[in-house]
Amino acid sequence: MMTNAEPNTTESTSHDSPNVPNSANAAFRPLRIWIPLLLLPLMLLMRFIPDLIQNGPSMIWMASAFGPFLVAALIMVWWLLFSRARWYERLLGIAGIVLILAVEQWIAHYSMRGPLLIVMTIPMTIAAFAIGLILLGQRLSFQRTALALILASVGSGVSALVKTDGVWGNFSFGLDWRWTPTSEDKLLARRPGGSGGTKTEATKDSSVTLDVESFKNPQWPGFRGPNSDSVQHGLVFSDDWKTEAPKELWRVPVGPAWSSFAVAGDYLVTQEQRGGDEAVVVYDANTGTQVWERTIPSRFFESLGGLGPRATPTVADGAIYAMGAEGWLMKLDAANGEILWKVDLRKEADREPPMWGFSASPCVHDGLVIIYAGGQGDKGVLAFKTDDGSLVWSAAAGVQSYGTVQMVTLMSKPMLGLLSEQGAHFWEPKSGAKILEYDWPHQGYRALQPQVVDGDKILIPTGLGSGTQLVQISESDGKLSGKELWTSKDMKSDFNDMVVHDGYAYGFDNAIFACIDLKDGKRKWKGGRYEKGQAFLLADSGLIVVVSERGELVLLRANPEKLEELAKIPAMDGKTWNHPVVVGTKLFLRNAEEAVCYELKTAK
């Protein structure tokens, strides 16, 4: 005889899923879907959190990079512990996710492995799995898990079909179909021999006669120019780009790199990635014709920062000094690219390349080439003889800097300066003896250059969480010390150096161009949406040239009262993080795909 409860149970189960046998229905329960419904929007929010929190901590970019992964992990905790699924469903679901990810990594493009697995592929796969479970949560059979795994395969499969050249300044991924030729592929296909295999000989265009004397007195010797400030003096340029627009003189494809140019006479020197080799390349500044290249086997790729060298070559005493992303510091003969010596910073500093590669440009002064290496202890900065590459001195300098050692004159004393995550460091050039160490810790890295203001102040730009600080330097009993004058979060440069003009600093506050008053650090204006670009000051013209991250060329008036945009023209395709250079009337631009030269009109 049947009890009163029995028909009610059968009736209820049959109502939940009439197409499933009663015995199977009794084994499954509807999923508790409100938890993933809350977590999925949180995953999306984490992706865009750096844009939403303008004055957040310096490591907020990590929320965008790794926040979605942590939310994905919470979704899997829900599935395993709180979903109401049967235990064999839960275990098979997790096993299926692991198998899907393993297959994806096996077939994925190399650029989508490693960090992109955590940053993109795992969140996409688990989000698709969660969406399937939400949609099918009331289906009382194992079909819901199987179908959710099929959706997870689709989500993971997207990653298997694409490749990346790194992220943009807002942490969005630069993605393309994996079968689409890259600009590097196209460049190599045009070279003699096709794919451009590894070469240890310098390749020289025999039709070009190189004037070696030009390299003994370069106009723009290296990163950000003779004073490391991206400023040109001596000419007054027209501000009317409507009737006197910059004239394009030449445009050539180049290999990937975030290097800028050094300029010596009629020659440009830069670095590029060319297949399995890093290359130091000299171009004719008048035509864009390659004069010679020197390649060594080395290829640095990091899926967030992208491919290729990061540093800019330095021209000094008739030679070229170059720093590769994997750690090779070299001296080359300017005439033909012959390697005169090279040292491996990985061995000298006892460290592997940092997350985004060795990025410091060489500083050459008084017979020494000084480079930031970021090793532990006293292996932060290393000084080598220019003659033979032997180590002369080393000094501590923090382990989180992507800046370049530069010569500064502070309190009428020439010295070496560098910013690291610890603060500002200053040394005596010949011995490496510490002159001043100003402590201003920053959580994360510094990738910017210090600026000397009025001969006795140091401007220290920093990214999110810290902002910019002006420090008064004083001398007592022969020793220098620093005192904070102000700290401003109205200017939070990341890797985008600022320029200083007539008592004001102009640069990027995160991704928007802005101006602050050096008297108090207060913002005067903010509004140029040029993303993570770079700026150059035409000092005698009162003009600022900005190259936006998207490759636009923008002309601004150096006006502290308001953003005064005079002109904007498309200049290059692709992500542009490289510093612009102006020598004479020529403006040289490059990114990871192409280089271009414009002629600027002078004022009448």
Image (cartoon, grey):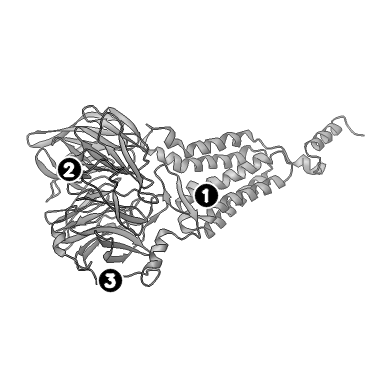
- The answer to whether residue 386 is seen in the rendering is no
Name the N-terminal-most of marks 1 and 2: 1
Q: Nearer the viewer, mark 1 or mark 2?
A: 1
Real-space Cα separation, disc 1 to disc 2, in angstroms: 44 Å
Quadrant in which residue 391 is drawn:
bottom left
Name the N-terminal-most of marks 3 and 1: 1
Image location of residue 375, percent across then percent down: 27, 51
Image location of residue 82, percent across then percent down: 63, 37
The residue located at (90%, 34%) in the rendering is 2
Q: Which residue is mark 1?
A: 121
Circle 1 sits in a helix, a strand or a loop, which is it?
helix
Quadrant in which residue 325 is drawn:
bottom left
Which numbered dot is residue 201?
A: 3
Three-letter amino acid code at disc 1? Thr
Question: CB atoms at circles 2 and 3 under 8 Å apart?
Answer: no
Front position in the image: 45 or 26: 45
The vertical placement of 175 against 512, above or below, is below
Circle 2 sits in a helix, a strand or a loop, which is it?
strand
Question: CB atoms at circles 1 and 2 under 8 Å apart?
Answer: no
Q: Nearer the viewer, mark 3 or mark 1?
A: 3
Image location of residue 438, percent across then percent down: 20, 37
Q: Residues within 10 Å of mark 2 (few under 14, many from 20)?
A: many
Three-letter amino acid code at disc 2? Phe
The vertical placement of 534 against 99, above or below, is above
Which numbered dot is residue 426?
A: 2
